[in-house]
Image: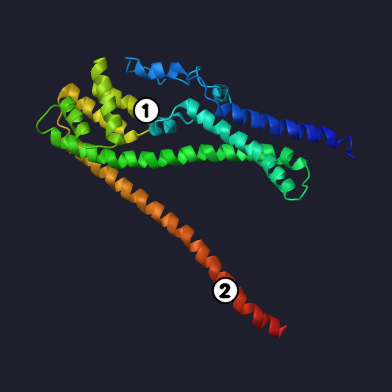
Amino acid sequence: MILSWELPLAVAGGAVAGGGLFLFVRELMPATPSLGPTLARLQPSVDVHAPLPRISNALGSWGWLAKYITVPTKELAILGKGTDAYLTSIAMSAIAGLVAPAVLVFALSLGGRTPHFVLPVLLGPVCAALFAFMAHRDVLSKASVARREFSRAFCTYLDLVVLELTAAGPVQAMERAAKICHGWVFERIDAALMTAQMQMTFPWDQLRLLAEEIGVTDLHDFAAIMRSAGDSGAHVQTTLHEQAESQRDRQRTDALARAEAISARLEMPAALLVIVLAIFMIFPIMARLG
């Protein structure tokens, strides 16, 4: 017979599991796409000095989450993902974590075991928070890798701009250099230059906006250098070459630091293995002495 205090917990556990399952099935169903962010991307503002736009209110069904969590807009921008997709990923991960304990309890009950029903009630919110945090960390990790890749490819772009400046002006050199190589980095730069051309604005202003959007300081410095070349006609080949060499030195230092950190993590299992072997060798001797 169920005690009086167990009945509310059973109802709460069933409500949590049922609500999580309902939200999961609801998100699997096709939804009407949000046209607001798409139209904003197709028709950007021509004011190059305007601040970056805030999160649109016309997000998907999970747009209300933007009021309670901090959205990594720069990380999403460099990955080419929208805020609505990020919020949906966080919400779906939280729902999966909320339903996981209930599914585990159901699987154990089919196997003949009867775990207490309080288990999904207590573990559901914890797993939901853990799964949401893992989805957030995954976005940050992918953005960090993409930013390093952007920096490596941007060094090549700087070298190409230096070569093009010997036979063309600043604007033509930037446009020609972006069309020589292939890859998502050059496509993003070329798209920014094409946007500046269609909006009849200076390309370095558009690159400055791109640098602020994705959080790449090297691109911002490059835009400032090319602005000086376009405004006063200064010779910037040497400055761009020095910037490229400085970036490569910084990349080598960062790569060495990451390699040392990985090597340090690899040494820990080896040290634990040596300790375990030492225990197995010393324990028989100590047992005989005892």
The answer to whether residue 44 is visible is: no
Image coords of residue 30 (percent x, y): 52, 24
Residue drawn at x 61%, y 37% is 96
- For disc 1, the neighbor class at 10 Å (few under 14, some 14 to 19, many from 20) is some
Give the residue type at disc 1: Glu
Image coords of residue 48 (percent x, y): 32, 18
Residue closer to the observer: 61 or 74: 61
Residue closer to the observer: 228 or 251: 251
The answer to whether residue 255 is visible is: yes
Residue drawn at x 65%, y 32% is 21
Residue drawn at x 43%, y 31% is 76
SS for dot 1:
helix
Which label is found at residue 277? 2
| Residue denoted by label 1 | 212
**Left or right, 90 with reference to 259:** right
**Left or right, 78 with reference to 226:** right
Which label is found at residue 10? none
Give the residue type at disc 2: Leu
Where, quadrant-wise, is the C terminus in this rendering?
A: bottom right
Image coords of residue 240 (percent x, y): 21, 37
